[in-house]
Image (spheres, rainbow, N blue to C red):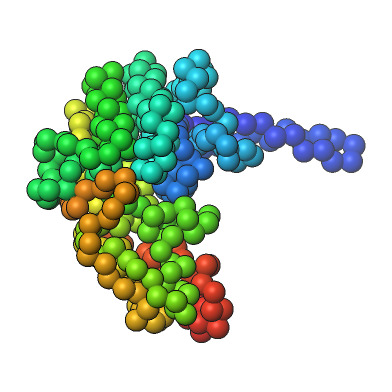
Amino acid sequence: MEGRQLEFKIRFFPGWVEVVQEDVVVPNRRALITGATGLLGRAVYKEFKDNSWHVVGCGYSRARPRFERVDLLDATAVEALVQDFKPHVIVHCAAERRPDIVENQPESASLLNVGASENLAKEAAKVGAFLIYISSDYVFDGRNPPYREDAVPNPLNHYGKTKLEGEKVVLQNNEGAAVLRVPVLYGDVEKIEESAVTILFDKVQFSNKSANMDHLQQRFPTYVKDVATVCLQLTEKKLQNPSLKGIFHWSGNEQMTKYEIACAMADAFNLPSSHLRPITDEPVGETPRPRNPQLNCSRLEQLGIGQRTPFRVGIRESLWPFLVDKRWRQTVFH
């Protein structure tokens, strides 16, 4: 799906000018990535770009100079962007994804997670773009895993509710769209607190004081590069089969509590873990979170879609730049 266009290049020489006609290959598969400055958005942007798509990424506070600066709450700006670029696919990664922030700022989170998603769904439908809306395992209450795509959602917190509302408005306004539910993500973070997984690394590294770690809630940490691959594979399947639509699940398949995640990090970097203390009490006063929201991913697997990087491999790739003990880094990576 590439186009060819003729370009003319002018070369100047002493006393004469040469005009050269070149046949240039131009990718005519166009992808628009929202939230391209975020952890998942960066990975999705790179995956499409590395596979010969013409990609435009948009962001807001961190957008320039690399990405388009677009306020997704501004319907006119969103319409102008989509109408001008006419993407074949829009991967909607932008969201307020921090449950505690959503709990404290429900109105602004709903505007982004629901309102902006509705706008995008309408604009994607106008230009015939395939919309992939990134949702969350937090649409489930975690009491009866694993969850298939047709399981009845029952979110425990406002974040889960806004993501579920986002799913509904997307599918109501764009019947050919896809919803891709994913669990807690990690990857090449710009700062260690960018992911709820990688933020645990400081407690692992600083072994001079004991650290209490939740050992009750089950999580399935998932590498953003794998999710990005799934988005690309799903898009390419959609181009072959336009009837592909609806809800899909993707997740890593290693079940771990935060305590077990921290121990796996320690193991990956050959660090001590004896200072980490497993706590099995119910968390008090926190934003409620599902006990075990495991996703059944068989729908994508049956389509031949999916990629899973072992946690110890992915976390090593993601966190070695943040390793305090440089001596270890030199022996392993040089």
Q: Which quarter of the rendered picture does the C terminus lie within?
A: bottom right
Work out whether 101 lies above or below 223: above
Work out whether 174 lies above or below 261: above
Question: Who's the residue at 46% across and 38% down the image?
Answer: 35
Question: Who's the residue at 27% across and 39% down the image?
Answer: 157
Q: Which quarter of the rendered picture does the N terminus lie within?
A: top left
Residue 268, percent across and down? 37, 75
- The residue lying furthest to the front in this view is 285
Residue 196 located left or right of residue 147: right
Question: Who's the residue at 35% across and 21% down the image?
Answer: 118
Q: Is residue 143 visible?
A: yes
Residue 68 located left or right of residue 112: right
Return the residue nearer the eye: 218 or 242. 218
Q: Is residue 230 visible?
A: no
Work out whether 259 lies above or below 299: below
Residue 196, percent across and down? 39, 55
Question: Who's the residue at 39% across and 82% down the image?
Answer: 272
Work out whether 33 lies above or below 293: above
Location of residue 259 (image quadrant): bottom left
Residue 112, percent across and down? 42, 29
- The residue lying furthest to the right in this view is 15
Location of residue 64 (image quadrant): top right
Residue 271, percent across and down? 41, 80
Residue 60 located left or right of residue 96: right
